[in-house]
Image (tube, grey):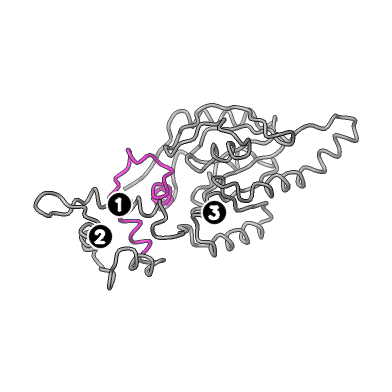
Amino acid sequence: MTIQWFPGHMAKARREVTEKLKLVDIIFELVDARIPISSANPMIDQIIQQKPRIKLLNKADMADKHMTARWIEHFENQNQHVLAIDAQTGAGLDKMIKMAESILKPKFDRMRAKGIKPRAIRAMIVGIPNVGKSTLINRLAKKNIAKTGNTPGVTKAQAWIKVGKVLELLDTPGILWPKFEDEEVGYKLALTGAIKDTILNLQDIAVYGLRFLQSNYPNVLMERYQFETIPEEIVDMFEHIGRLRGCLMAGGEINYDKTAETIIRDIRGQKLGNLTFDIDV
């Protein structure tokens, strides 16, 4: 199955981001800590070019902490500014603002030397849908300003939001890119909720999730679904999980659609613990 999703408003958002770039001092690029490569829009590099950027690994509370540490080391070795955060609880946000102030200190020092009155840092938040941009804004602003929701694509227009006296944020709609060069990227985005479930074949996504767990987190898979040994055939996995979780139709037949939904919900809901799906550091 090939997964693609590039609604019209995303093409428009790319144009708007490009147009507004000159208004901001720094970019906050939000990625999902569970898929820090797969959730990084490759168009962002083209769009922002040399603009200062901080890569924020959001939802770090849901990711494999060992893998997050490895990814942070990887990005730092590429001379990128990077932080693991949790926008839901606010963990890491103080460090984010301090890092931005540190990066922009030379620019603001030059402004002061020219007699320009100090002002708030102007930042743009970019990232794919459902990565937590609105949640981050609301946490920073300490009130519900930006719309939030678990449905990808809630934010459709740009808006400036003040964060105290130190920061002004330009929110932008989530932007996916026109084509996933690697089919597996599409599966990872779908599995973590970045793509609308209504356009997906959830059985295919659940199969991908089970195979990934079998290869990378077999003990977690066995414990959650009470496998003595993990079956080689995917249909046998579905049969076992479906019966265990009561996903049955009349006559005791397995409801494969319901079983797939259960598996995906378990993965997204951390019923299998903290998982990272980008593992090739």
Q: Are marks 1 and 2 in contact (CB under 8 Å)?
A: yes
Q: Which residue is mark 2?
A: 241
- Amino acid under disc 1: Thr
> What percent of the width, then of the height, locates residue 261?
29, 49
| Residue at image point 69% right, 55% down | 79
Question: Taking 206 as reference, is 156 left or right?
Answer: right
- Badge 2 marks a residue whose secondary structure is helix
Q: Is residue 218 above or below residue 77?
A: below
Q: Is residue 277 located in the magenta-colored stretch of the structure?
A: no
- Amino acid under disc 2: Ile
- Labelled disc at residue 262: 1
Magenta span of residues: 185-213
Report which quarter residue 158 is drawn in: top right
Q: Which residue is mark 3?
A: 60
- Labelled disc at residue 19: none
Question: Taking 250 as reference, is 64 left or right?
Answer: right
Question: Of residues 147 and 1, which is closer to you in this image?
Answer: 147
